[in-house]
Amino acid sequence: MAIERTLSIIKPDAVAKNVIGKIYSRFETNGLKVIAAKLAWLSPQEAGAFYAVHQERPFFKDLVSFMISGPVMIQVLEGESAIAKNRELMGATDPKKAEPGTIRADFAESIDANAVHGSDGEDTAKNEIAFFFPAMAVYSGR
Ligand code: IDP
Ligand code: MG
């Protein structure tokens, strides 16, 4: 077990539903600390670059359109096994398959509008944090 950092995004559907605070509360009560955050309205270029790994997938265009449909809340979470812990709190990609009590089961409507993003591994966490918070590595040495 180790202290890790991961990138989390509260997607436009959940921001529009006014549940930023409820989702933050899930992080806080489960040992994840918000150590950087910003509310942003992504451009098509930013959303496309962030999801570049999914470029060839059939849902890529819809995913980018959805991610730019309204503001998002972007944060770095820190804590014990933060990457896996956040994925556990999020639940499965398809909210219909997500465990009861997870963020997606409780706040998401569909596989397209599924409330949250979370890094899926150490490398993606590092790259995704650098993508949205380029100064963090410089200041913290991590
Ligand atoms: P994850 O968000 O649970 O890590 P990924 O497979 O990385 O899931 O997919 C990224 C995002 O792309 C998902 O959160 C979801 O919004 C969207 N997505 C994934 N699979 C589908 C699909 O089959 N149809 C529509 N959208 C999808
Ligand atoms: Mg993913």
Image: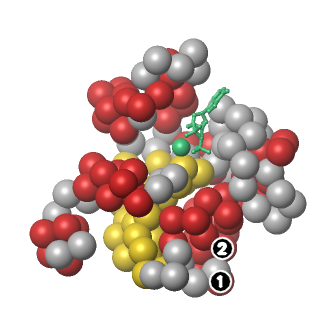
Q: Is residue 115 left or right of residue 36?
A: right
Q: Residue at x 49, y 35 (%)?
A: 67
Q: Residue at x 64, y 81 (%)?
A: 30
Using the image, determine if residue 72 lies above or below residue 59: below
Tell me the amino acid under the disc marked 1: Thr
Q: Secondary structure at mark 2?
A: helix
The alpha-carbon separation of the residues under discs 2 and 1 comes to 5 Å
Label 1 within 8 A of ligand 1 by Cβ: no
Q: Which mark is residue 26?
A: 2
Q: Secondary structure at mark 1?
A: helix
Q: Name the residue that disc number 1 marks.
A: 29
Q: Nearer the viewer, residue 11 or 117?
A: 117
Using the image, determine if residue 86 lies above or below residue 39: below
Q: Is residue 79 left or right of residue 104?
A: left
Question: What is the quadrant of the C terminus in the image?
Answer: bottom left
Residue 122 appears at what percent x and percent y?
A: 41, 60
